[in-house]
């Protein structure tokens, strides 16, 4: 028995970076205890942190995310666009289609399904500038939805993704955030306490980012199931759903990247596209096409203004509720998505990486919001009560839209299943990334660690729901993103320095 336990422990620790694993685990356990047993205090702390960041760092958020987008465009079009992420003769490990399926499922996850109807309707009834529920508010609603889900988030992901892919596949550095320290500070700093601190920060950031998505997913799955059953919509049900789906995600992450996550991502994309095409065909098709084409033009026309604008009235919290929340969420997600897409991007050039990761998911997102948001806006302007549903239960907004379309009994179940699969792919991809970081950047971490991080993500998501639901999720994302942005700035400098040195 003692020998078996010893062998089991050796198997776990053989690929473990103890300082990072136990440091991250300590922070996660502390967070869950604090949030679970001191819910009122923790909710107040999250809210105070969010208000401080929004008040003092709002302008910083706007400038830094726009800077990331400009840097990404320079990478894709500049002198290093033909540099390979790996040796010059390396080939991609995955087909372009499989690669795109995985990066899209990881990069947007359940959030795009959650907000596809709710965000455009929310902006329509409470726009930042236009008169509420006017024709001008329709255009503004779509512009800002595109803005929050378009080029900026994918540029944020690219920063860490392309940096770590280059350092890992080209220079054999660990597939962990600490690798960005090497070109600037050297191996001693990378492998020391500073490197451990960067990795711990990114693990915690990944957990909060993924847990945000899981919390949203639980709310929406609960709303979906309640639409065709007698299951109540409450926190107990949502936490139970987190437990069930976390268990399924744990099985997937133990199976591994090629057999588990890749196949789930492909299945996920099929379910999502079928639902998208159904709403596009059964909804106001010509209105959707016209709205999408007009909104894309206006998106690029107003992009500079939206990217740098930080002058809403002091009494308005619109920008904190939406733009700051999204920038914090995307930055919190950046270690997770960045490391994950770095892991699957060997053999691609920097230019190819930037083109596919920046443009194709953004275009798909535009089509998604134009279809679901456009259908919802059209219904609202023609007497529907979707806006009231969004105001009362934002998690039910997609299902409320589907109830107004044909075959509702089928599509309600289909949409709920699609959300659950999104839920699972986000969880297992996030667990896989946390495993890699806490195992010192090993691309195939030990399975017991994978189980631990999958369960931890579910625990953090449940804690956020207990603390305060959607508002707690938003506050945690905004606060964490401010700290994580410093890691991305460092990654930009490290990548440029390394590329220039290698070209000499």
Image (cartoon, rainbow, N blue to C red):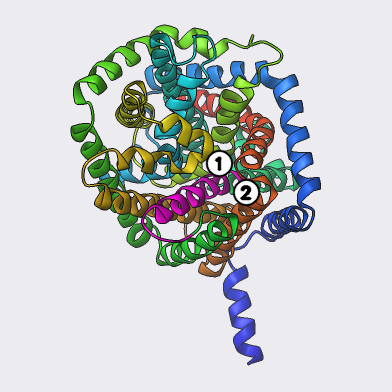
- Residue lying farthest bottom? 1
> x, y (%) of residue 42?
77, 46
> Can residue 439 be seen in this snapshot?
no
Callout 2 secondary element? helix
Q: Dot 2: within a 10 Å radius of its alpha carbon, few (fewer than 14), some, or many (20 or more) residues? A: many
> Separation of disc 2 and disc 1 at Cα?
8 Å
Identify whether 215 is placed above or below 282: below
From the top left corner, tell me how far across and down residue 110 is, in percent.
43, 44
The foreground one among 215 and 76 is: 215
Locate residue 95 relative to residue 254 in the image: left or right. Answer: left
Asked if disc 2 and disc 1 are in contact, CB closer than 8 Å, the reply is yes
Q: Position of residue 91 (x, y in %)?
A: 29, 43
Q: Secondary structure at mark 1?
A: helix
Residue that carries the numbered disc 2 in the rendered image: 203
* Residue interval drawn in magenta: 208-231
- Mark 1 crowd level (few <14, some 14–19, many ≥20, 10 Å Cα): many
Lateral position of residue 42 relative to residue 182, left or right: right
Could you say which disc has been placed on residue 335 in the image? 1
């Amino acid at each position: 028995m003692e020998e078996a336990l010893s062998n089991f422990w050796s198997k776990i620790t053989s690929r473990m970076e103890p300082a990072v694993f136990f440091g991250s685990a300590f922070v996660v356990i502390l967070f869950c205890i604090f949030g679970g047993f001191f819910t009122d205090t923790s909710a107040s702390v999250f809210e105070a942190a969010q208000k401080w960041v929004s008040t003092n760092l709002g302008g910083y958020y706007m400038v830094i995310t726009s800077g990331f987008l400009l840097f990404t465009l320079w990478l894709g079009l500049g002198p290093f666009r033909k540099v390979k992420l790996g040796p010059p003769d390396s080939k991609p490990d995955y087909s372009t289609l499989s690669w795109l399926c995985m990066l899209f499922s990881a990069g947007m996850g359940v959030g795009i399904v959650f907000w596809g109807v709710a965000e455009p309707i929310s902006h329509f009834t409470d726009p930042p500038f236009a008169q509420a529920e006017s024709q001008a508010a329709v255009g503004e609603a779509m512009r800002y939805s595109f803005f929050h889900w378009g080029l900026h988030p994918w540029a944020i992901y690219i920063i860490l993704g392309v940096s770590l892919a280059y350092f890992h596949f080209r220079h054999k550095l660990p597939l962990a955030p600490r690798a960005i320290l090497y070109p600037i500070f050297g191996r001693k700093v990378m492998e020391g306490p500073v490197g451990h601190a960067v990795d711990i920060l990114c693990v915690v950031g990944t957990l909060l980012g993924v847990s945000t998505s899981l919390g949203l997913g639980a709310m929406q799955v609960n709303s979906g199931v309640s639409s065709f059953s007698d299951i109540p919509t409450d926190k107990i049900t949502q936490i139970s759903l987190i437990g069930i789906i976390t268990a399924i995600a744990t099985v997937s992450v133990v199976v591994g990247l090629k057999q588990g996550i890749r196949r789930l991502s492909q299945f996920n994309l099929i379910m999502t596209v079928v639902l998208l095409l159904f709403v596009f065909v059964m909804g106001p098709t010509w209105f959707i096409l016209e709205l999408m084409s007009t909104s894309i033009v206006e998106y690029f026309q107003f992009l500079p203004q939206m990217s740098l604008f930080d002058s809403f009235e002091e009494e308005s919290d619109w920008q904190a509720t939406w733009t700051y929340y999204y920038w914090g969420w995307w930055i919190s997600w950046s270690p997770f998505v960045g490391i994950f897409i770095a892991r699957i991007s060997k053999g691609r050039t920097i230019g190819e990486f930037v083109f596919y990761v920046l443009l194709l998911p953004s275009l798909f997102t535009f089509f998604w919001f134009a279809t679901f948001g456009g259908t919802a806006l059209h219904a609202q302007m023609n007497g529907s009560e979707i806006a009231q549903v969004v105001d009362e239960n934002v998690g039910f907004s997609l299902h409320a839209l589907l109830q107004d379309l044909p075959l509702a009994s089928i599509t309600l179940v289909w949409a709920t299943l699609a959300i659950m699969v999104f839920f699972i792919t986000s969880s297992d991809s996030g667990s896989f990334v946390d495993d890699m970081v806490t195992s010192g950047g090993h691309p195939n971490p030990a399975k017991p660690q994978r189980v631990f991080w999958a369960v931890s993500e579910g625990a953090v998501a449940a804690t956020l729901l207990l603390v305060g639901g959607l508002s707690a999720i938003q506050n945690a994302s905004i606060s964490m993103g401010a700290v994580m942005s410093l890691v991305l700035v460092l990654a930009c400098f490290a990548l440029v320095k390394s590329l220039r040195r290698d070209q000499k």
